[in-house]
Image: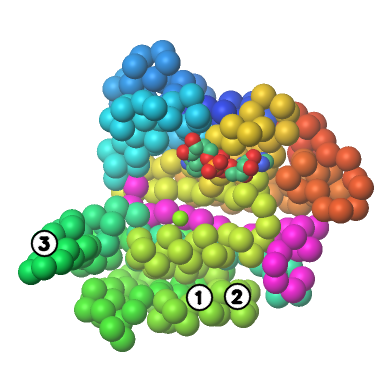
Amino acid sequence: MSTPSLLILPGDGIGPEVMIEVRKVIDWFGANRGMNFDVSEDLVGGAAYDAHGTPLHDDTMAKAQEVDAVLLGAVGGPKYDDLDFSVKPERGLLRLRKEMDLFANLRPAQCFDALADFSSLKKDVVAGLDIMIVRELTSGVYFGEPRGIFEEGNERVGINTQRYTESEIDRAARAAFELARKRGNKVCSMEKANVMESGILWREVVQKVHDEDYPDVELSHMYADNGAMQLVRAPKQFDVILTDNLFGDILSDCAAMLTGSLGMLPSASLGAPMANGRPKALYEPVHGSAPDITGQGKANPIACVLSFAMALRYSFDQGDEATRLEQAVEKVLADGVRTADLLGEDGVSPVSTSEMGDAIVTALTASL
Ligand code: NAI
Ligand code: MG
């Protein structure tokens, strides 16, 4: 097979700072595991605006469509707050998601034992937690028509429409079942089929995709409100959770916070399979550009490093190497290495962004 290609878009704020640490990890896999990537780097967000007057150059967009995976840092910052909406840094990211048609947003909630004390829940409820929320990202109530604020008699009415076609549900369901096969082989689909027709269709289509093509995966259905309760009561019962855009927005934020800091959370957005069978894919940390700590060496690079681990698993079929990387992060945390965002009251002094990156690379070497 040809060398897998990776487009790196560091972006703004702490994006470039955390990406330097990911480059160390990528180089380590090249030098020690014979895994070479055809890596290219380009601009997105405010950095692209400064250079080209647009938050995503057409050439960068074209490149993103061709590579096996895109890894993005973060976009935005106060410097760009007064820009016209059409050229705001966020538009660069939105354009990538839209034109790559990334319909499945993957948000893991994984709790490293060493950080279990950070959770707002009891330690034994979250220790060892490893779940994945698959949120449909390109349809549903955020996009459905009609929408708007209209006059109706003597008052105004605000309208949004929850709308899902069978094919939109079908492809999101397939993404979830495929993922489940690479994990714990279990999918729980969440909607509100008790009160919403779109939920009835959602449930039917998910069941049909399961029965026809993924009978080996364990499937259950749950009302989304019960799902929210179960997530805080006993989150470890789940492996993959499949849900729509609106419920997924809320449930994924909720699940993520079971595990502690924003600086730890990776994500992926996947689209349709390309000619080589790999899905179009964009990997990025959940956090933003963190202008309050930019340039101070305080950023935690782990969210971005774990985003690369997701790329290894879901784009490059290197699940064992992804696990190796996650275990290296786990070891570093267990050894008490902490960036400032992971510090409790225990008087440990924090390490810098680059010291955290170096510690992860050292742990990788120790894993050989
Ligand atoms: P943020 O995620 O950038 O920061 C929120 C808080 O978490 C800050 O106190 C920050 O210092 C901290 N934080 C975030 N990531 C961290 C890390 N890796 N290590 C240590 N601490 C970390 O969200 P905020 O402040 O709402 O937005 C800042 C800028 O980022 C805005 O311009 C916003 O539009 C943009 N943004 C971009 C996103 C993206 O690129 N996907 C997502 C969210 C916000
Ligand atoms: Mg949200």
Residue beneath disc 2: 232
| The residue carrying mark 1 has its beta carbon less than 8 Å from ligand 2 | no
Measured in 3D between alpha carbons, the distance from the residue under mark 2 to the one under mark 1, in whole angstroms, is 7 Å
Left or right, residue 107 beside residue 96:
right
Circle 3 packing at 10 Å, graded few (<14), some (14-19), many (20+), is few
Give the SS element for disc 3.
Answer: strand
Q: Residue 15: percent from the left, percent from the top?
A: 57, 31
Give the SS element for disc 2.
Answer: helix
Residue beneath disc 3: 151
Q: Is residue 110 magenta?
A: yes
| The residue carrying mark 3 has its beta carbon less than 8 Å from ligand 2 | no
Colour mode of the rendering: rainbow
Q: Residue 60: percent from the left, percent from the top?
A: 36, 23
Residue beneath disc 1: 228
Q: Residue at x 41, y 43 (%)?
A: 281
| Circles 2 and 1: CB atoms closer than 8 Å | yes
Measured in 3D between alpha carbons, the distance from the residue under mark 1 to the one under mark 3, in whole angstroms, is 35 Å
